[in-house]
Image: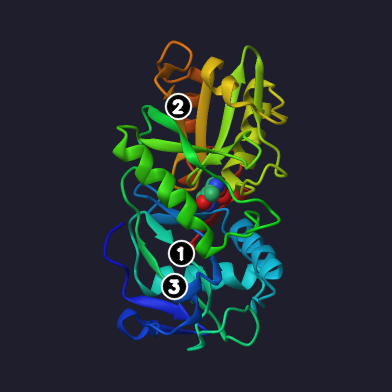
């Protein structure tokens, strides 16, 4: 991620980034009390246009995260999409970008609690890094760290503090020579990767863990299920997946706003399929990239132009 853009949306106004600052005593700094989103915007040079991808769905999810945490998001998803377009226009963004909405307990208040700590809504944006994860093949490790349970820290809400687990898992995977970590649920079933969901193919069956397996309900996951149905007539099964199925599957992919759709080529030293990226995965990756820059005739409703046409 590059240097953040100059203007940041903070609680109803646009301020220069040097004024968008938190106190070291902000509640969220000590306890991770808050929720966030990550939204992609893709620049299309031929169209001279920047497209937000599924921005409304991301803000709807943020609204649900806020409700789970007992926080209030004062703007509607549609208003937040409009504000995000305004933010990108003010920053004159003409390159692919990443938008990071944050709802934070920002008050200087060190008691451990969710109430009366002054929540703030901040929306910074940064240039989008090239590829967050290798789109040509990812070598994964099943982490020794597990997902938290819904009864501990609910993963349905994108809670800031809950990303310490995935961060530990990612570092463990990198230190062991892998690219990415796969986390199991507390019960030992496949949940997801550190910042992406997982789908596998066993023979003709495509499967992904259901939302009750302590995963984040990914927007890209939903898009891929739509595309597999439309393009290949495949209905993805949402079911519990065993760790050993990862070792024996014929194809696997990771999907998320940053990852898009990346083929998994290895898990814990076992090749996935023949060890080469799956053909279906690569096809879905191409289609998703085209949809994000509106170079595809379908699903224009998944993107929102930033500049007036
Ligand atoms: N799981 C986790 C834990 C994530 O952080 C993300 C990224 N938001 C995803 C899955 C993928 O979700 P989405 O497709 O909505 O980006």
Nearest to the eye among marks 2 and 3: give it. 2
Side of 94 where 181 appears, left or right: right
Give above or below for 87 relative to 1.
below
Q: CA distance from mark 2 to mark 1?
A: 26 Å
Residue 274, position as x, y percentages in the image:
43, 10
The residue carrying mark 1 has its beta carbon less than 8 Å from ligand 1 = no
Picture residue at 71% right of the left edge, 38% below the top: 210
Picture residue at 63% right of the left edge, 26% below the top: 242
Dot placed on the residue nearer the N-terminal end, 2 or 1: 1
Nearest to the eye among marks 1 and 3: give it. 1
Residue 220, position as x, y percentages in the image:
57, 43
Mark 1 Cα-neighbour bin, 10 Å: few <14, some 14–19, many ≥20? some
Which of the 4 image quarters holds residue 50? bottom left
Q: Secondary structure at mark 3?
A: helix
Q: CA distance from mark 2 to mark 3?
A: 35 Å
What residue is disc 2 on?
264
The answer to whether any part of residue 132 appears in the image is no
Q: Secondary structure at mark 2?
A: strand
Quarter that holds the N terminus: bottom left
Side of 171 where 157 appears, left or right: right
Q: Check whether the beta carbons of the residues at disc 1 and disc 3 lie within 8 A of each other.
A: no
Q: Secondary structure at mark 1?
A: loop
What residue is disc 3 on?
87
Q: Check whether the beta carbons of the residues at disc 2 and disc 3 lie within 8 A of each other.
A: no
What residue is disc 1 on?
100
Mark 2 Cα-neighbour bin, 10 Å: few <14, some 14–19, many ≥20? many
Nearest to the eye among marks 2 and 1: give it. 2
Give above or below for 241 relative to 203.
below
Give above or below for 209 relative to 109.
above
């Amino acid at each position: 991620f590059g240097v953040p853009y100059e203007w940041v949306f903070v609680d109803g106004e646009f301020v220069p980034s040097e004024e968008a600052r938190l106190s070291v005593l902000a509640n969220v700094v000590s306890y991770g009390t808050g929720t966030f989103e990550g939204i992609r915007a893709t620049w299309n040079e031929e169209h001279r246009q920047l497209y937000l991808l599924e921005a409304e769905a991301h803000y709807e999810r943020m609204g649900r995260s806020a409700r789970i945490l007992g926080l209030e998001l004062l703007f509607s998803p549609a208003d937040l999409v409009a504000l995000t377009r305004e933010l990108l226009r003010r920053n004159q963004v003409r390159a692919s970008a990443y938008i990071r909405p944050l709802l934070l307990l920002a008050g200087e208040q060190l008691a451990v609690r969710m109430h009366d700590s002054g929540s703030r809504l901040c929306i910074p944006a940064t240039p989008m890094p090239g590829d967050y994860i290798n789109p040509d093949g990812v070598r994964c490790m099943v982490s020794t760290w597990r997902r938290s349970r819904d009864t501990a820290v609910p993963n349905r809400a994108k809670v800031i503090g809950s990303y310490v687990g995935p961060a530990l898992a990612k570092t463990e995977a990198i230190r062991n020579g892998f690219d990415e970590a796969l986390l199991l649920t507390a019960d030992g079933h496949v949940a997801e990767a550190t910042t992406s969901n997982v789908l596998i193919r066993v023979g003709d069956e495509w499967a992904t863990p259901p939302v009750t397996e302590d995963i984040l309900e990914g927007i890209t996951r939903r898009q891929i299920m739509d595309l597999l149905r439309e393009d290949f007539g495949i209905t993805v099964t949402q079911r519990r997946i065993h760790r050993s199925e990862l070792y024996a599957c014929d194809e696997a992919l990771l999907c998320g706003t940053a990852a898009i759709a990346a083929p998994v080529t290895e898990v814990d030293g076992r090749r996935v399929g023949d060890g080469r990226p799956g053909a279906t995965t690569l096809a879905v990756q191409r289609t998703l990239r085209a949809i994000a820059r509106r170079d595809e005739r379908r699903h224009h409703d998944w993107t929102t132009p930033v500049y007036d046409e």
